Amino acid sequence: MKPAISIQKLNKSYKDEQALKNISFDVEQGELFGLIGPDGAGKSTLFRILTTLLLADNGEAEVMGLDVVDDFRNIRNRIGYMPGRFSLYQDLTVEENLDFFATIFGTTIEANYDLIKDIYVQLEPFKDRPAGKLSGGMKQKLALCCALIHKPEVLFLDEPTTGVDPVSRKEFWQMLKRLKQQGIAILVSTPYMDEAALCDRIALIQKGEILSIASPESINDSFHGTLVAMKSHRMYELLKALRIHPKVESCYAFGEYLNATLVEGVTDWKPIEQDMRDKGFDDLVAHDATVGIENVFMQLLSKTEA
Amino acid sequence: MSDKVIIAKDLTRKFGNFVAVDAVSFEVSKGEIFGFLGANGAGKTTAMRMLCGLLAPTSGAASVAGFDIASQTEMVKKHIGYMSQKFSMYGDLTVKENFLFYGGVYGLKRKVILERLDMMLGLLQLREATNSLVDSLPLGWKQKLSFSLATLHQPGIIFLDEPTGGVDPIARRQFWDLIYEAANDGVTIFVTTHYMDEAEYCDRVSIMVDGKIEALDSPENLRKQFNAESMDAVFQELARGTSTK
């Protein structure tokens, strides 16, 4: 079986800025593949090339075995694309937007209703509302429906959850899971690291380069060094004290706790804990930290910047 | 002026029959980092616009920096700083030009603006960006510069509307260092975010659901109150009601 998406040594520059540097990877059929990286990493450029809206400088890419340059018309009929910016017609109602996209692809809402039913029932109470007047979470759901209405084989979702609240985000990912179960391959990008855990595989991307590709479980194993979690009621002072400690490589806030990575070769954090107590952090709590994808990404980032 | 720099009492805003903000009451102390959370459409933006003197309340009242938000809007605007993720600086002006423009709007003297610009960029270690076009800078830099710009007229309160959306995890934390520094200096921070780990960094957090504040306490107490492991769990528990609206 051919991969849903196949990318070979893709390069793209804008003037003197290299947006994509020698990118290669495959997305299998029925796979939920996450592209994780901050703004400006090159995610949208890659999406535009794969959806045949932008030409690469060199390298090759195929979607469902079709070349993104030679077979662009065929590809457009077989993929769904949800761009990063909300791009539906704001002054058309929910229903009109959906009808419009169905008609363009020569189909009807009824013909593929099964595919969007789960999502559309939540939108139905608002079907006469102009799309521009929907809340952020609802806009995303409508955009997803419009991208799905012609029953695509591959779905491209460029930051579908940016600016969406945590509850709506969780719901959105549950929908993606259900679509995947119906055999649709999905390439999705996000700046939220916690969403990465829900993908089959993820690629971490920064400044046009892929830093790592792996399953969410195995990517955490690539973390080097010892990670310790600490907290106190004086968090900012503790953060500053840990950062200048000679045995601490780096220290960042991670929700309720601070996460400190120890310098290479140091595995015992007890002496550091003692030093902090001596500095007056009487209520200090310290324990081994569980490595998360954000820790890995930050470690990779600081390595590429060093 | 009392220690409470934001006081909202039964603050309400209706649009037609729709009650966007429904009799909201809370107080924020000087130097506090106050997290203002809620699902999309819960009424955060409407509440924030009222507190910034940009939208009149339908009923109820609020004072910000000691000024009434309905009758003293210009004084409110003078004493607050505002930064949003969506718009903060003009991309086709240089950093210096942006500072001169904003400083001018606030009536600051050119000499004062340039002194503060130099000092702020020095602290951020971004002096090299002084004469760069804002559009050419990385997002992480832009956000730090926007924050400095919002503090240029030395306001006592800064409103931050999703300031860290889309930046990388390191830049996001560096941004919070700026927030902590400002709060240490006695500046009050009023911040909205969709990152639940950032909710943990606030002194107190309020969660808005359908126009009402449904929870308001320190992250630690909220976790205890809802018997939850994280602020994300607290949020999921509380905000679920709005998600089907």
Image (cartoon, coloured by chain):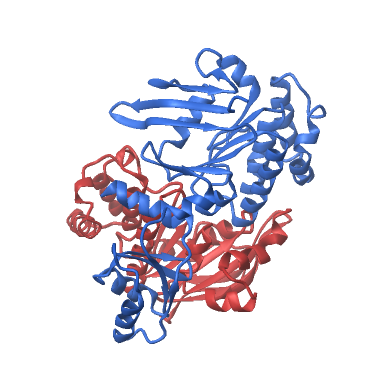
Chain colours: A blue, B red
Counting from the top left corner in percent of width and height, residue B214 is at 65, 70
Question: Left or right: B243 with respect to B140?
Answer: right
Quadrant into which the N terminus of chain B falls: bottom left
Q: Is residue B163 visible?
A: no
Relative to A272, is B238 above or below? above
Question: How many marks can you see?
Answer: 0
B10 or B69: nearer the eye?
B10
Counting from the top left corner in percent of width and height, residue B90 is at 35, 42
Question: Left or right: B40 with respect to B166?
Answer: right
B198 or B108: nearer the eye?
B198
Residue under the point 73% across and 18% down: A106
Residue under the point 34% across and 27% down: A14
Of all residues shown, which one is farthest toward the right? A110
Relative to A55, is B83 above or below? below
Residue under the point 62% across and 72% down: B228
**Image-quadrant location for residue B221:** bottom right
Q: Is residue A161 visible?
A: yes
A293 or A47: nearer the eye?
A293
Question: Left or right: A66 with respect to A14?
Answer: right
Counting from the top left corner in percent of width and height, residue A75 is at 60, 20
B121 or A218: nearer the eye?
A218
Counting from the top left corner in percent of width and height, residue A87 is at 58, 33
**Image-quadrant location for residue A281:** bottom left
Question: Left or right: A45 with respect to A217?
Answer: left
Of all residues shown, which one is farthest toward the top? A70
